[in-house]
Image: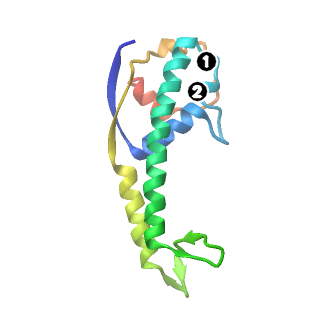
């Protein structure tokens, strides 16, 4: 199958992963009735987006460890407020996470056609995936 590359932000990759695999709010595209070929390529794409999601979570968790404090059970957190004042480390963490989410990554994926999904009947909305379709 022919491939192409699309630039997506980390936030879009995170969203795309949910669109493919599903969430509490909607069924993922992979749970829809699709041809085996289409499902195969969507599964590969879900793996790629999952790797990006895991990398983001690792970097975010390292930042939490760096800026946070552990409670008596060893749980590390960065509270928004400390003693009624804004925690500067929280602001730093929030800004760092927002910057991470804006980073663009180039993702190689098959050229999907809307016809590949003509049999799908869904109530879901998949805006990032539609971007891959050029819609």
For the point 56% across and 38% down, which residue is it? 18
Q: Which residue is mark 2?
A: 29
For residue 24, the mark is none
Q: Position of residue 103 (x, y in %)?
A: 33, 48
Name the quarter where the C terminus is drawn. top left
Q: Is residue 125 visible?
A: no
Q: Residue at x 56, y 70 (%)?
A: 76
Q: Secondary structure at mark 2?
A: helix
Q: State the SS at label 1.
A: loop
Where is residue 133 drawn, in percent x and y? 42, 23
Q: In the shown orientation, is residue 25 left or right of residue 60?
A: right
| Residue in the picture at 62% in, 35% down | 22
Residue 71 is at least partly visible in this image: yes
Whole-percent x, y for residue 30 in the image: 60, 25
Q: Reading the chain from its start, which is encountered first: label 1 or label 2?
A: 2
Q: Furthest-bottom residue in view?
A: 83
Q: Is residue 104 left or right of residue 61?
A: left
Q: Quadrant of residue 33?
A: top right
Q: Is residue 68 or residue 101 the one in the foreground?
A: 68
Residue 92 drawn at (x, y percent):
39, 70
Instruction: Write the residue at 67% across / 42% down.
Output: 24
Do the CB atoms of the residues marked 1 and 2 lie less than 8 Å apart? yes
Query: Quick check: 125 above or below 109?
Result: below
Residue 110 as seen in the image, left or right of residue 37: left
Report the Cα–Cα distance between label 1 and label 2. 9 Å
Label 2 neighbourhood size at 10 Å, few (<14), some (14-19), many (20+)?
many
From the image, which quarter does the N terminus lie in? top left
Indicate which label's residue lies in the foreground, 1 or 2.
Answer: 2
* Residue 87 versus residue 66 in the image, above or below: below
Disc 1 designates what residue?
120
């Amino acid at each position: 199958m022919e491939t192409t590359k699309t630039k997506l932000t980390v936030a879009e990759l995170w969203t795309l992963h949910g669109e493919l695999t599903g969430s509490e709010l909607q069924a993922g595209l992979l749970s829809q009735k699709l041809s085996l070929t289409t499902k195969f390529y969507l599964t590969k794409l879900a793996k790629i987006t999952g790797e990006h999601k895991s990398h983001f979570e690792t970097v975010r968790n390292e930042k939490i460890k760096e800026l946070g404090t552990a409670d008596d059970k060893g749980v590390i957190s960065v509270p928004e407020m400390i003693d009624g004042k804004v925690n500067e480390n929280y602001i730093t963490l929030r800004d760092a996470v927002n910057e991470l989410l804006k980073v663009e990554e180039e993702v190689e994926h098959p050229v999907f056609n809307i016809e590949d999904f003509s049999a799908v009947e869904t109530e879901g909305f998949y805006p990032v995936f539609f971007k891959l379709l050029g819609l």
